[in-house]
Amino acid sequence: MLHKTFRSPLLIILFFLGCSLARAATELSEPQLLVKEAAEKLQAVMKENPPAGNYKRVSEIVTEILDPHVDFVRISALVLAKHWKRATKDQKKRFIKEFKALMVRTYTVAFSEYSDWEIEYLPIKMAPNDDKVFVKTAVLRPGAPPIEVNYRMIHRKGAWKVFDVVIEGISFVSNYRTTFKNDIARTGSLEDVIQRLATHNNKE
């Protein structure tokens, strides 16, 4: 059910984690640096603009920071799987818009609860001509075990972008693919899923 996923912010919050100063490895690769840069920008924005009472403006800023580093089109296509190919151009456009809003909204609302965490960047396996990489990180929490958060990134049109995140072995894309697959199977309608996403995102 969609509403069950909406109420589980941990998956999103770790995907776009704006953390405390990252613990750098000896030298970070370009994909790692992009993740680090986005995280530090998000941390600064959220500290200066607490989400409470200012959600709309903060979410706009968060979206601006994430857009260059996240391939929302690819994520949407992977999440919908076979239903993406069957969707009309208008449905694809609206799904991308609403799914992006869902991710940003959940992150923005949940961020303050996790703002003290830090990221450690682990060694990366990457050949010079690789166009896909798996960026491994550990989210560090005071007095608690680290959480493994790994990013799948792809190089397209001269830029690296995130298209999935795996948290403690659970894939963001796979998780939502199952959710939407079940909802579409139950209702028989991608349109219904898009409309319910829009209704959820329009709630204050």
Image (spheres, helix red, strand yellow):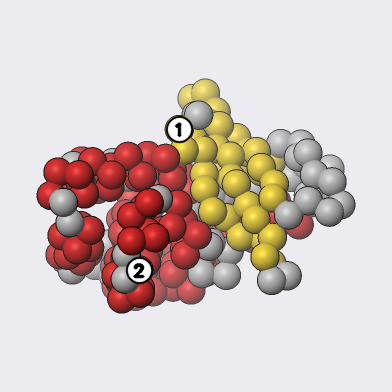
Q: Position of residue 128 (x, y in %)?
A: 86, 52
Q: Position of residue 114 (x, y in %)?
A: 42, 44
**Nearer to us in this view, 114 or 158:** 158
Kindly identify the residue that appears in the image at 52 percent across and 23 percent down.
145
Q: Position of residue 111 (x, y in %)?
A: 38, 52
Q: Please, what secondary structure does the residue beneath circle 2 have?
A: helix
Query: Could you tell me how far apart the alpha carbons at marks 2 and 1 are, in whole angstroms?
Result: 25 Å
Q: Please, what secondary structure does the residue beneath circle 1 have?
A: strand
Label 1 sits on residue:
170
Q: Name the quarter where the N terminus is drawn.
A: top left
Residue 17 seen:
no
50 above or below 106?
below
- Furthest residue toward right: 128
**Nearer to us in this view, 39 or 164:** 164
The part of the image, by quadrant, that contains residue 86 is bottom left
* Label 2 Cα neighbours within 10 Å, binned few <14 / some 14-19 / many ≥20: many
Kindly identify the residue that appears in the image at 69 percent across and 71 percent down.
157
**Tag 2: amino acid:** Lys
**Nearer to us in this view, 45 or 30:** 30
**Tag 1: amino acid:** Ile
The label nearer to you, 2 versus 1, is: 2
- Per the rendering, the mark at residue 92 is 2
